[in-house]
C-alpha cells in the first residue's frame, strides 16, 4: 500500500532559557551552556493510505511533539517529514497551502480549540472561504451545513457560539473544521482524553465512520490503551522521545516484546482479572529529557538491562513481519 | 439588548450605588458638554458679549452677586458658568480623543508584540519600560515646552505617553491567548499571520480595554489640567478646566475664590464620576487587573 506519510529520523529539541551565568569553564576556555529538552530523539515511522496509526506513550514522552512537528506548529531540528514522498518546505507558499489542505489536526481540548468569539458557521466556514474551496457565500454555507450533518450536529446550531455546546459537541465541531479542508490525513492529538468516558466511544466511532466515508488516514496520539486497541491498525510505543516498539496492533497486543511495552500493557486497568498480562511494576521515574541516559533510554528502569544496554542504544530491528523492537533482550522473559 | 438587561452584569450594576452615581455624573457632563453652549447665557469668548465692568462679580448667593451671573464672573467679566461649560468641552474632548488614540495604538502594539514575540516584543516592551520609567507628566512637559501649546499638539503628546498602559495589558492577554489551541488550529488551517492576529487573537484580548479605557479618560483629564495649570497645555484662547484654575489662581488669595475653585470643583466631580464607574467595571469585568 502507498505510504501517505513518512517520518524519518525526526529530532525535535526545545531550547531552554539559558541564564547569563550558565557557562562551563574547561581547559579550552569558557563556553556557554545551551541547555535543551530532547523532546523527540530520532523517531521514524510511516502511515499507509487508509490506516490508523497510533502513537502511544506516557505524558511527556514526546508524542504530541511529533504531531505538532508534522503539522509544522513547531520546528524540527533534523529529519524528514514526507507527505506522499515529498517534503514540504515552509518557504514555498503554494506547496505549504497544498500541504495544509491535505493534513489537518483535531485537538485535545475541545474547550480551548474553538475560537470563543466565532459562531460555529464561521469556525467551520472560515477555512472553506479562505482557501476558496467553495466559490461563494451560499455554497460555503451549504458545505458547512453538510459537514455539520456528517458529524452529527443539526443545522440550527450554526448561529451559536462554542460556549453553548457540550464537550462532545465541541469536539464534533473541531472534527467538522478539520474535514472542511477535505484532508487525506488527520492527526488526532488525544481527541477524546478530555471527554467523559460515555462520550469517548461516540466520538471514536464517529471518527471511524468518517474515516471510511472520506477515505482518511489517521495518526492518533493517545495514552489510553483501550482507545488504541479499539481503533488502530498499527501502533508505535514511545518512551523518552523514541519509538521502542512498533508494528501491527494485534501482533503487539498479543506478544509485546519490549520490556517497556510489557510493563505498559500490564498496567491497563482491569475488571476482574481480564488483563492477560502479568503485572510488572516499573521502578523509578522517567529520566529528565534535559539529560538523557546513555545507551538504551529505558535501561535505568529495565529489569533486563546489562552493560550493553548502558553502553549502546539498540536499533529498531524487524523481528517478525513489520514488528519492530528496539531492545537487545526482546527474546528474554522476566 | 434584552440579554444585556437580564445579565448578571447589569444586575450588579443596578445594585451598585457608586456605579450608577458615577454614570449619572458622566452622563450629565457629556450632556452639558454637548448642548451646554446653546443654553448658557453668554459666549465668554465673544468680546461683544462680555463687559469689563462686570469683572470679578461673586456668585449670586454672595452679597454682591447678581442673578445674571449665577457663578460669578472672572477678571474679564465673563460669566463663570459659561466659562466652565466651554472649558469642560475642551477637557472632555482632550480626555476622550487622547484615550481613543492611545487605546488604538497601545492595543495594536501590544497584540503585535505579544504575538510576534522575540526581538519585536523585546523592542516594543523596552520602549514601553523606558517611557514608564519617566513620569509621563515630565515627558509631556518637555514635548509641550518644545513645540508650544495647542489642543491638537496636546492630544498628540498625551497619546504619545498614554499608549504604554494599553500595550502592556494587551500584550499580557495576547501571551496567554497565543498558546490556546484555537490559535494553533488557525495555523494548521493555513491562515496568514495578519488574519490570525486580527480575527483570532485580537477579538479575544479586548476584555480589559473597557476598564482601562474608563480609568484612562479620568487620568488624561487630570494630566491635561495639570499641564494647562503649568501653562504648557491648551492655548489661552481655548481654555480647558485646568487653565481656568490657573487663571483664577493669581487672585485666589485676594478673596476671589470662585474664579479658581469652581472649575477645580468641576474637574474633581467629573474625574470622581469616571473613577466610580471605572472601579465598578474593574471589579466586575477583570478582578485580577490592578
Image (cartoon, helix red, strand yellow):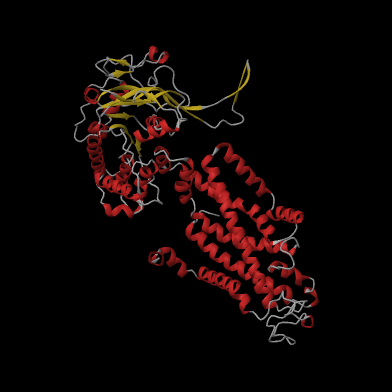
- Work out whether residue A222 can be spotted: no
Q: Residue at x 37, y 14 (%)?
A: A306
* Location of residue B81 (image quadrant): bottom right
Q: What is the x, y in percent for residue B245?
A: 72, 70
Q: Residue at x 44, y 21 (%)?
A: A293
Q: What is the x, y in percent for residue B178?
A: 47, 43
Q: Quadrant of the C terminus of chain B?
A: bottom right
The foreground one among A201 and A207 is A207
The foreground one among A7 and A320 is A7
Q: What is the x, y in percent for residue A314?
A: 37, 15
- Work out whether residue B63 can be spotted: yes
Q: Quadrant of the N terminus of chain B?
A: bottom left
Farthest residue to the front: give it: A135
Farthest residue to the top: give it: A308
Q: Is residue A230 above or below residue B86?
A: above
Left or right for A166, reference B138: left
Q: Is residue A81 above or below residue B225?
A: above
Q: What is the x, y in percent for residue B146?
A: 76, 54
* Location of residue B260 (image quadrant): bottom right
* Location of residue A110 (image quadrant): top left
Q: Is residue A82 above or below residue B70?
A: above
Q: Residue at x 72, y 70 (%)?
A: B244
The foreground one among B9 and A289 is B9
Numbered-mark total: 0
Q: Residue at x 56, y 61 (%)?
A: B214
Amino acid at each position: 500500500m502507498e505510504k501517505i506519510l513518512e517520518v524519518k529520523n525526526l529530532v525535535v529539541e526545545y531550547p531552554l532559557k539559558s541564564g547569563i551565568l550558565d557557562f562551563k569553564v574547561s581547559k579550552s576556555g569558557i563556553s556557554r551552556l545551551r541547555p535543551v529538552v530532547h523532546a523527540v530523539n530520532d523517531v521514524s515511522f510511516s502511515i499507509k493510505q487508509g490506516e490508523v496509526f497510533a502513537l502511544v506513550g506516557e505524558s511527556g514522552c514526546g508524542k504530541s511533539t511529533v504531531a505538532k512537528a508534522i503539522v509544522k506548529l513547531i520546528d524540527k531540528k533534523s529529519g524528514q517529514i514526507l507527505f506522499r514522498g515529498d517534503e514540504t518546505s515552509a518557504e514555498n507558499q503554494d506547496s505549504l497551502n497544498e500541504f495544509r489542505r491535505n493534513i489537518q489536526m483535531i485537538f485535545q481540548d475541545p474547550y480551548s480549540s474553538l475560537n470563543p468569539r466565532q459562531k460555529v458557521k464561521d469556525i467551520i466556514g472560515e477555512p472553506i472561504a479562505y482557501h476558496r474551496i467553495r466559490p461563494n457565500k451560499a455554497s460555503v454555507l451549504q458545505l458547512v451545513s453538510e459537514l455539520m450533518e456528517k458529524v452529527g450536529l443539526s443545522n440550527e446550531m450554526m448561529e451559536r457560539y462554542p460556549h453553548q455546546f457540550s464537550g462532545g459537541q465541541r469536539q464534533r465541531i473541531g472534527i467538522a473544521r478539520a474535514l472542511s479542508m477535505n484532508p487525506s490525513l488527520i492527526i488526532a492529538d488525544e481527541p477524546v482524553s478530555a471527554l467523559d468516558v460515555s462520550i469517548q466511544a461516540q466520538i471514536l466511532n464517529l471518527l471511524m465512520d468518517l474515516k471510511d466515508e472520506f477515505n482518511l488516514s489517521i495518526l492518533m496520539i493517545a495514552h489510553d490503551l483501550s482507545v488504541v486497541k479499539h481503533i488502530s491498525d498499527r501502533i508505535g510505543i514511545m518512551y523518552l522521545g523514541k519509538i521502542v516498539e512498533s508494528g501491527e496492533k494485534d501482533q503487539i497486543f498479543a506478544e509485546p516484546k519490549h520490556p517497556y511495552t510489557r510493563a505498559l500493557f500490564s498496567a491497563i486497568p482491569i475488571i476482574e482479572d481480564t488483563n492477560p498480562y502479568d503485572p510488572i511494576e516499573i521502578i523509578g521515574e522517567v529520566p529528565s529529557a534535559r539529560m538523557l541516559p546513555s545507551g538504551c533510554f529505558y535501561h535505568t528502569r529495565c529489569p533486563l538491562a546489562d552493560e550493553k544496554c548502558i553502553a549502546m542504544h539498540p536499533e529498531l530491528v524487524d523481528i517478525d513481519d513489520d514488528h519492530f523492537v528496539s531492545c537487545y533482550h526482546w527474546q528474554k522473559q522476566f | 439588548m434584552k440579554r444585556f438587561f437580564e445579565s448578571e452584569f447589569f444586575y450588579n450594576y443596578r445594585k451598585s450605588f457608586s456605579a450608577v452615581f458615577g454614570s449619572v455624573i458622566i452622563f450629565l457632563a457629556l450632556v452639558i458638554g454637548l448642548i451646554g453652549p446653546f443654553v448658557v447665557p453668554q459666549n465668554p469668548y465673544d468680546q461683544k458679549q462680555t463687559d469689563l465692568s462686570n469683572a470679578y462679580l461673586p456668585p449670586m448667593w454672595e452679597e454682591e452677586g447678581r442673578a445674571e451671573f449665577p457663578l460669578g464672573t472672572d477678571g474679564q467679566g465673563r460669566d463663570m458658568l459659561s466659562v466652565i461649560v466651554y472649558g469642560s468641552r475642551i477637557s472632555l474632548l482632550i480626555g476622550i480623543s487622547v484615550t481613543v488614540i492611545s487605546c488604538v495604538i497601545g492595543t495594536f502594539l501590544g497584540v503585535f508584540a505579544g504575538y510576534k514575540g522575540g526581538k519585536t516584543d523585546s523592542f516594543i516592551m523596552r520602549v514601553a519600560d523606558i517611557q514608564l520609567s519617566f513620569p509621563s507628566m515630565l515627558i509631556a512637559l518637555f514635548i509641550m515646552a518644545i513645540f508650544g501649546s495647542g489642543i491638537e499638539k496636546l492630544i498628540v503628546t498625551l497619546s504619545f505617553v498614554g499608549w504604554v498602559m494599553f500595550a502592556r495589558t494587551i500584550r499580557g492577554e495576547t501571551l496567554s491567548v497565543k498558546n490556546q489551541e484555537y490559535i494553533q488550529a488557525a495555523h494548521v488551517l493555513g491562515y496568514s499571520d495578519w488574519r490570525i492576529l486580527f480575527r483570532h487573537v485580537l477579538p479575544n484580548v479586548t476584555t480589559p480595554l473597557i476598564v482601562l479605557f474608563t480609568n484612562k479618560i479620568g487620568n488624561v483629564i487630570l494630566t491635561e489640567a495639570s499641564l494647562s495649570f503649568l501653562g504648557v497645555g491648551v492655548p489661552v484662547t481655548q481654555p480647558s478646566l485646568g487653565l481656568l484654575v490657573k487663571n483664577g489662581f493669581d487672585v485666589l488669595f485676594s478673596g476671589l475664590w470662585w474664579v479658581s475653585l469652581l472649575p477645580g470643583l468641576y474637574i474633581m466631580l467629573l474625574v470622581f464620576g469616571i473613577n466610580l464607574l471605572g472601579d465598578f467595571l474593574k471589579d466586575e469585568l477583570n478582578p485580577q487587573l490592578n
